[in-house]
Image (spheres, rainbow, N blue to C red):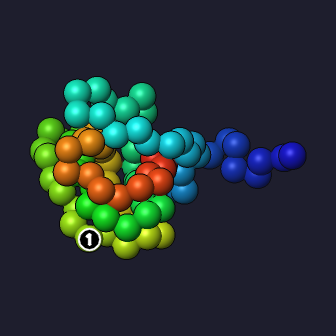
């Protein structure tokens, strides 16, 4: 299949090119830094941002895309399920 946009540079406001399941871990970073996270099942999402901060997004509804660049999702403090990283 042809990709009409193959010769364009991707920016942070461009659609994600990769998607991957996130496995929360209190001590290991994700393999890829995200540009956003899709939340499949409602709950809290505790993350480490690329800026080094730790924050909990509380009461996130299922189906929401959080436009945040992160490199870790913590097990401790995360109750949301079916998280997908978009990069």
In the figure, residue 37 lies in which quadrant? bottom left
Q: Which residue is mark 1?
A: 59
Q: Is residue 37 left or right of residue 50?
A: right
- The x and y percentages for residue 13 are 44, 58
Residue 76 as seen in the image, left or right of residue 79: left
Rate crowding at label 1 as few (under 14), some (14 to 19) or many (20 or more) other CA atoms within 10 Å: few
Residue at (25%, 42%) from the top-left corner?
Answer: 74
What secondary structure is marked by label 1? Answer: strand
As drawn, is 22 to the left or to the right of 54? right
Outermost right residue: 1
At which x and y percent is residue 18? Answer: 57, 43
Residue occupying image coordinates x 31% and y 64%:
43
For residue 61, above or below residue 5? below
62 and 8: which is toward the camera: 62
Q: Could you say which is closer to the camera, residue 28 or residue 11?
A: 28
Q: Quadrant of residue 58?
A: bottom left
Q: Tell me if residue 78 comes above or below residue 75 in the rendering.
A: below
At 31% from the left and 69% from the top, the residue drawn is 60
Left or right? Give the position of 49 relative to 42.
left
Total tally of numbered discs in the picture: 1
Relative to 72, is 68 above or below? below
Asked whether residue 15 appears in the rendered view, the answer is yes
User: What residue lies at 69% left-to-right and 50% top-to-bottom?
Assistant: 5
């Amino acid at each position: 299949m042809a990709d009409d946009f193959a010769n364009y540079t991707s920016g942070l406001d461009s659609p994600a090119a990769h998607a991957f399941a996130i496995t929360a871990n209190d001590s290991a970073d994700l393999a890829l830094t995200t540009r956003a996270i899709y939340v499949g099942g409602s709950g809290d999402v505790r993350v480490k941002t690329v800026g080094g901060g730790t924050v909990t997004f509380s009461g996130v509804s299922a189906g929401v895309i959080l436009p945040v660049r992160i490199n870790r999702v913590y097990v401790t403090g995360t109750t949301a399920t079916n998280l997908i990283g978009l990069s």
